[in-house]
Amino acid sequence: MKPLENVAIVGVGLIGASIGLALRERKLAKRVVGIGRRQSSLRVARQMGAVDTTTINLARGVADSSLIFVCTPVGQIAEHVRQVAEHCPEGSLITDVGSTKQVIVESVDGKLPRGCRFLGGHPIAGGERSGPAYARADLFEGRITVLTPTKNTRAEDFDTLSDLWARLGAVVVRMSPEEHDQALAITSHLPHLVASALAGMMPEHLLRFVGTGFLDTTRIAAGSPELWRDIFLHNRTNLQEALRLFQAKLAQFAQALAKNDAQTIQALLEEGKRHRDALAG
């Protein structure tokens, strides 16, 4: 794959800046343009080498780019994709990194002007800390990136993004937008909801007594409330089903405790340990 001439990144937070670092470190793009609202974030992204140049003017930033990554919060992605399509070169390919897909894809797939196309993506990487200061060129190494093509997706567009993400170190998985959102409701969105609920229920006068278990379990609750609010609402139907499954599991624990049922409690704990031990991290 020869280097791309110009790549634009709308939103230079953790993911956007990490994409820029990875593109430049691997020499996959001759020029990377960072676009954002805050000059402070753009300055950090530029200073750390995530982008070659920056601007707060979206139209100017995408004017010469045939590939554009939209890395803004999920509630803003569809509108930003439409804005990009109005100002980028005709026939450009636009993708995103949002952790919900169905609402976004339904909003823009096959509906963009001037021959522009959209192919949804989601690198399953990152953390509770946001901003370009925490970006890493190896953030996507060995991590799954989901691409969500539809009947409107050109095979060459899927191949382009699949190859590019692979060169950034990711393992590319193809899913429908619906399958993606069903899976992420359980693997990502529910854990954040549970962590937030657990952190929120803790009385303030007991906070000084918490240990590493509580801190580890609630770490992700430190993420942006605004960002996660939009994720929950975008994927609310799937998240409600995931929450129902979780409540059923909690009910099993509650029933076993009420009956002083040591055997069931141990079986439930062993099930959890077995599933956790199967994970790499």
Image: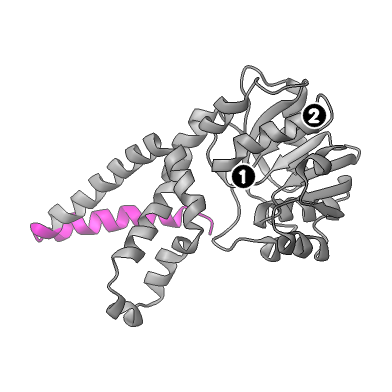
Q: Earlier in the sequence, mark 2 or mark 1?
A: 2
Q: CA distance from mark 2 to mark 1?
A: 25 Å
| 22 versus 7 height, above or below | below
Q: Which residues are magenta?
A: 257-281
Which residue is the site of mark 1?
144
Task: Say which quarter of the image contains residue 203.
Answer: bottom left
Q: Residues within 10 Å of mark 1 (few under 14, many from 20)?
A: some
- The circle on residue 92 is 2
184 lies left or right of 155: left
Q: Is residue 267 one of those drawn in magenta? A: yes
Seen from the viewer's position, the closer of residues 234 and 35 is 35
In this picture the colour scheme is: one colour
Q: x and y percent of residue 71 in the render?
A: 66, 46
Magenta residues: mostly which secondary structure? Answer: helix
Q: x and y percent of residue 47 in the render?
A: 82, 66
The quarter of the image holding the N terminus is: top right
Q: Circle 2 sits in a helix, a strand or a loop, which is it?
A: loop
Residue that appears at 68% across and 56% down: 139
Q: Is residue 270 one of those drawn in magenta? A: yes
| 129 versus 173 height, above or below | below
| 47 versus 76 height, above or below | below
Q: Amino acid at mark 2?
A: Ser
Does the residue at mark 2 contact the one at mark 1 (Cβ under 8 Å)?
A: no
Residue that appears at 49% across and 29% down: 178
